[in-house]
Amino acid sequence: MENARESNWKGLVFPAGILVLWFLLGCTGRLNRHIIPSPGDIINAFGHLWRQGLLWSHFSTSLLRVFAGFALAAIVGVPLGMLMGWFPQSTFWFGPTLGFLRQIPPTALIPLFLLWFGIGEAPKLAVIFYAAFFPIVVNSALGVQEISQDYWEVSQALCLSPWKTLRFLILPGSLEAVFTGLRLGMGLSWRAIVAAEILASTSGLGYLVMTARSLARVDEMVVGIIIIGFMGLLIDQAFLTVASRLILSRRGVKHASTAPRTAPSLQEVS
């Protein structure tokens, strides 16, 4: 515990030093406020946006979009990934396609999604879904494939039904990998929605940054960027906390080894 706290404090030294240097340069007037606003300018811009209600409006809009698209990706990706891991031969059919599609950046598909779904919430949700889907499905499949072969043989010897196999073997055995995929998917979702809002939106944090740019309000741009980074970090830490607690509580049912099953993994195929 003490080592963890010491590491956290050490991690704050560098950003604290940057803030102090930034503040000192701002106080001496050596910063061009039209290019690099001072910390005081940032605080004033934050207060201005908050009093107008713009900050909360854009922030809540982005957050709702992210959670909606991410939830859809998780609902589809986790079961599909587990099925692919449960029946490893399916990687011969789907592995190359997943390997190809996951290399395409979500932002590259924004014009196509706009053409297909029009201007509204649908293309933004499609971008988020696309960004989150692949790490979720791939990690879910790998989590099942990495369950020890011994456990599969025991389940067959006990003649477990598919439901009991899923409940007592697949779910606990792949839990860590599934949460890794969910964490990666959420991080990519947050980045994707900001890009989508910058390119095609009239609300959200990305739109706030883009509007501030067009009005030459660098201070408001920095406010939006700081909130984007802070919320991304906060969401990531929340996932780490939840995942670590769930995984530690189920260490007794986690697979003991990672002997591979007799089928190629998604990594090998894609």
Image: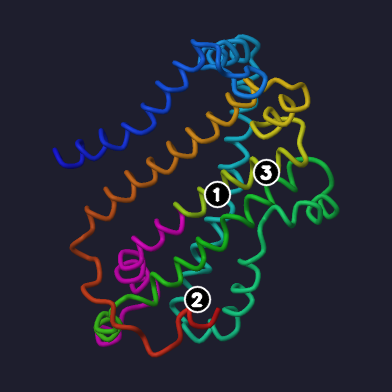
Is 159 a magenta residue? yes
Q: Residue at x 46, y 86 (%)?
A: 264
- Image coordinates of residue 250 in percent, x first then y, are 23, 58
**Mark 2 lies on residue:** 84
Which secondary structure type mostly characterizes the magenta part of the structure?
A: helix
Is 168 a magenta residue? yes
Q: For numbered disc 1, what is the local secondary structure? A: helix
Crowding at mark 3 (Cα within 10 Å: few <14, some 14-19, many 20+): many
**Mark 1 lies on residue:** 71
Q: For numbered disc 3, what is the local secondary structure? A: helix
Q: What's the mark number on residue 234?
A: none
Q: Residue furthest left?
A: 2
Q: Which residues are magenta?
A: 156-182
Residue type at mark 1?
A: Ala
What colouring style does the render use?
Answer: rainbow
Crowding at mark 1 (Cα within 10 Å: few <14, some 14-19, many 20+): some
Crowding at mark 2 (Cα within 10 Å: few <14, some 14-19, many 20+): many
Q: CA distance from mark 1 to mark 3?
A: 19 Å
Q: CA distance from mark 2 to mark 3?
A: 31 Å
- The mark nearer the N terminus, 1 or 3, is 1
- Image coordinates of residue 210 in percent, x first then y, are 72, 31
With 256 as the anchor, is 39 left or right in this view?
right
**Mark 3 lies on residue:** 195
Residue type at mark 2?
A: Met
- Image coordinates of residue 240 in percent, x first then y, are 35, 47
Q: CA distance from mark 2 to mark 1?
A: 20 Å
24 w.r.t. 180: above or below: above
